[in-house]
Every structure is written in structure tokens, then in C-alpha cells.
Image (cartoon, coloured by chain):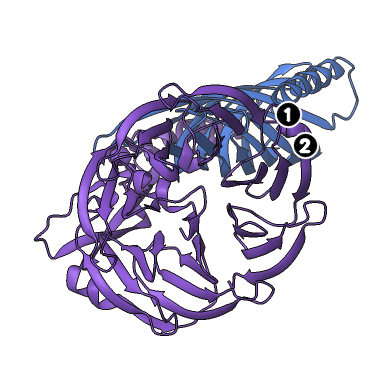
Amino acid sequence: MKFLYLINLFLFTSGMTMAQTVEQPVKRYMGTVELGYLYGNNKQGDLDNFVAAPSVEIFNGVRLHRLLAVGATTGFDFYNNLLITPFALGIRGEVFNTRISPIYSIDAGYGSAFLSHESDNEKKKGGWMFNPALGFRVRSGNGTAYTFATGYKTQEAETSTFWGSSMTDQKITYKRVSVQLGFMF
Amino acid sequence: MRKGPLPVLQQAIALLLFLPAMLLSSCADECETTTTYTVYEPVYMLRAELQNAVKVAPAQTLREPGKIYTKGHYLFINEIEKGVHIVDNSNPTAPRFLSFINIPGNLDMAVKGNILYADNYIDLVAFDISNPLDVKLVNRVENVFPTYFGMLVNDTSSVFISEFVETQLTQPAGTDCNSAGLGWRNGWMTLDGRAFASASVVQPSNSAGKGGSMARFTISGNHLYTVSNSDLQVLDISNATDPKKGEKIRLGWGIETIFPYQDKLFIGSTTGMHIYDNSNPTSPVHLSTYAHVNSCDPVVVEGDLAWVTLRSGNACAGFTNQLEVINISDPRSPKLVKTYPMQNPHGLGIDRSTLFLCEGKYGLKIFDAKDHLKVSDNLISHFKEHDAFDVIPMGSNLLLIGQDGLYQYDYSNLEDIKLLSKLPVSH
């Protein structure tokens, strides 16, 4: 299941990337790959504990208008002890048709913990996620562009740890600042 | 680059660079942690309350039947921790409930003459049952079973723990986001205080007139033998209405059943079978212990052979389901003769080489055991339709208790075993 998903993801993204080498007069397809960090305070009791969770995000969508592209977002968010794989609907848009333009993105959906490692006495569950972001892109020719975006990501999750007949249940709402560098094609 | 958008862009970039810093203060993960754990809360009972609770009540239907015991044409059916049903069985095709003796904490019983002995949590009570419609309490021997739940009850203490109630507690455990490291705080609270006690409670059995293979009370001559988890208690009942505490013999943990045969006592434990010489009934002497893997194991004996069942299950901590045949012609060195795999054997009974074996939810199996080396080849019949805990073969009638009730079979013709009646359990 996990491997199947990963292989599909790879084939899909690589296939889409290769498809771009064929220039099309009207570019309908829009894809982005973004790497970054989700930064926030993972409080340990009363102590502040600022952490940064690495994040990878992949968007595939269709450009309906310069201001609106609709598609699906997936990726990996490496939280502490928890690997969240979002399955989200996303919209993207570019404000101007210039070489450098502000962009926005909104992703909303479910972040699954199915790829997360679980030991025998653990259960991990994902939850709803919401991730709006603002940034800008710099065209690099050939229909591609670099992006820089910063936003806010909230993600719900639940972990249960079993100790004999007792259980510790933790409901987590991650609230993080996302800082991402990406490539748009 | 055109002039127009640039100032806007510069502003946007500046904003983007400062935005994370502005958001940071509100970006703290929220974690809500709860721990759920099981506690066993003791329920205390006053000694006076215990004594007042023992009384005869109108007939009731079976709810959670435990051990069975037969004497004359009466059946005594234990209602686990509640009391004893008295059933008129003069007509086995239509048994009739006569009355119910309310005995809190009762699990086992035995009858000698007209006296019924029963455990009443920590005490032993004796009833006159010469008229089953008018049962009278004739005696109470205090503190015969003083180690209820492994806690020693002082002779003079006015309270004791009658039971443990299982409770699930859920408590908030703070807003610490430290991932899942909190459980250890409550880890030790989950120790199952009931583990020892419940091992003995769950299984029904019966005994004199005549008891089954899972009995913990047995009468031999003028002595009543009771086994607790750890001890064999001898009670002198030569004067039936006045039982006297005799010797107490430490047996080790996990004692489950006692079965008298001729001048021997066969005591089944979770780790093996103890054989005691009972020729001096006031002070049984240990002859040998036949040890096996951990599991629950009732014993019956006929001739030179002891039949032991081992089964797996929660209370029994074993993973073996089998029937063992043990040669006990030399009681000082019992020898395993043969092992048969079984499904989930509970109580068993043997009558003139016919072996009755309860397979729990797999029903009752009846074997011809004339050739003890080929028992599994000689299955006479298998009643699969209901659960079976324990049996008492009584010559031609068979008493069988299971989760759904008490069944009586006529096995005078082994080729055609007939169901006579059923006393159902009402839920």
C-alpha cells in the first residue's frame, strides 16, 4: 500500500514533468514542487520549544485563469514522530503576467498518517489540514518558474499509546508558519 | 521590467519577509492529552452485613450458574457469588426450582447427610436441608477462607474486601506536546488486583452426594476438604452441624480443583497435579506432584488412571488444549501415558470407562475410554449445539452445565443418548 502510493507518486510527477518538454501554445497544466519547513512552538509543558518540521509539497492542477488554477496537493510533513501525508484540494493563482509576480495558494483537505511509523502499542491518526500561503514567483523561461512562499498551516492529528490496559491519547493541532521554496512548471 | 508593478511587488516581498515573524507568536501547537486507565476499586463489606445477608429466598431462575452438586434427588446449582439454587430433580425430565439460598460470595458447596456446606466470602456456612422448602442456617465457621483476594482478613476486623469493581478512568494529562511519553505515570496503576482471585472464580464445578471434576469443595468420610488458591483446608464434620477447622496445608499458588478417589486426594493446580495420601484424613500427606505446563486442569480418576485436561484461556495463562492420561498405579511417581489434542477442554467426568469431556463452546464429547491409548478413535458422540463447562455422570443420567443452562441427558444406552431436560439461563 505504502510502496504503491510512493511509486505512483513518482511516476505521476515524473510523467507530468516530462510532458512539459513539449511546448504548448496555451499552458493548461500547472505543477509545483515545494520544499520547506513548518515552524512553530511545540510546547513542552510551560517551556517554549520552537521546532521546524521539514515539508515537501506537490501540486498538480489545471490553469483556468491566470488568477486561478485548481488541483490536488499531496506531499509529506515530517512532524515530530508523525509523518503526515496530505490529500488536499488546492487552488493557486498568479497576480500579474510579469516575470516576477505575487502568487497565492490555498490547500484544504485531510492529512493522513498512513505512512507514519507505528509501533505495536501505538495508533496514529491524521486529521483536517488547512494551508493558505502568499509568495512570489520568478519566471525562469520555458514555462517554468521559481517560487518563494510563506503561509500558515494547521493540521489536526491524534496519537494513542497503549500501556497495558491504560492508554494515553493526545489530540494535536499543529499551528505552524510555512516557509517554502519551490519550482513551478 | 515595467515600472508599474514594481513598488507593489517590493511591498509584497517586504510583507512576506515580515509575515512569518508576525505570525510566530500565534503559532504554538495545541496538544490535549488524556490518559485512560483501569483501576480496581475495592468494595468493602461489613462482617455483620455478610451475616445478615444469608437467608432463604423464593425460587429464582438461573442467571450465571457456577458449580453444580447433586444429593439424592436434589440438585444444588451455584449462582456465582450470589447463592445456591435448590432444585427438585426427582423427575429428571422436569426439574423444578424449590428455593434459593442467598449466600453472598458463594462459589462452591458440598453436602453431607442433611447438611449443605457453602462458602460465604470469608466464612463457611452450614445449612440444614432436610426439608428443602425450609432451609435453616445451622452454623457459621468464621475466617475459614481468610485470604480472599489474597488479602488476609484479620479475625477481629469488622470489614473485608468483598469484590473489586473494574473502573475505566479518563483523566486529562495536561497540554504538554511532548509526544506520547506520559503513560508511564499511570503504568503501575493497571496491575490487575483481581488476577489471582478471578482465576478461580470463573470456572464452575461441582461435587458429594457427588461433585464434578472442577470442584473446590469435597467431602471424604467425616472430613470436608476445601481448596483456596494456595491452601488445602481440612474441616472435621463428624458432627455435621458443627464443622471444626482442622489442619491447613499450604499447596502453593494456582490451586483449582480437588477430586477424592479411594484414599487419595487429587488436587489440580495451574502447574500440575498434586497427589495427597488421605489415609489419615485429618492430615493428608503429599505423595507426588505431576508437573506440566501452565494451564487450567481439572482431574478425574478411575482405576489406575487419572485424566487431566489442560486448556488455554485468559485465567489459565496457558496455550495448550489437551487431554492427558496419567498412570497413577504408583502414586509416588505418576507417569504420563498418552496425550490427546482437544479444542478447549473444561470439566470432565468418567463413568465405567465412558469419558465425558466438556469442550467449552465446542460442546460435549463422549468417548469410549476402555482402551485408554485409543480414546480419540472412540468418539461415541459430540453434542455441539451448546456450551459445556462441567459434567457429573450419575450412573445413567448426566448433568451438564454450560453458559446457557443445566442439561440432563440419559446415557443408559450409549448408542442413543437422550436429552431429558434443560433449565435455561435467563438473561
In the image, A19: left or right of B132?
right
Furthest residue toward left? B156
The reply to whether residue B4 is in sight is: no
Q: Which residue is mark 1?
A: B374
Mark 1 closeness class: few <14, some 14–19, many ≥20 residues within 10 Å: some
In the image, A139: left or right of B284?
right
| Chain depicted in blue | A
Quadrant in which the N terminus of chain A appears: top right
**Res. B378 mark:** 2
Q: Indicate the amino acid at tag 2.
A: Asn
Residue B75: give x, y in percent of width and height: 52, 69
Q: Depth check: give the residue in front, B28 or A8.
A: A8
Q: Secondary structure at mark 1?
A: loop
Q: Depth check: give the residue in front, B289 or B164.
A: B289
Residue at horizontal 63%, vertical 53%? B388
Image-quadrant location for residue B265: top left
Q: Colour of chain B?
A: purple
Residue A181: give x, y in percent of width and height: 57, 22
Mark 2 closeness class: few <14, some 14–19, many ≥20 residues within 10 Å: some
Q: Depth check: give the residue in front, B3 or A22.
A: A22
Q: Are marks 1 and 2 in contact (CB under 8 Å)?
A: yes
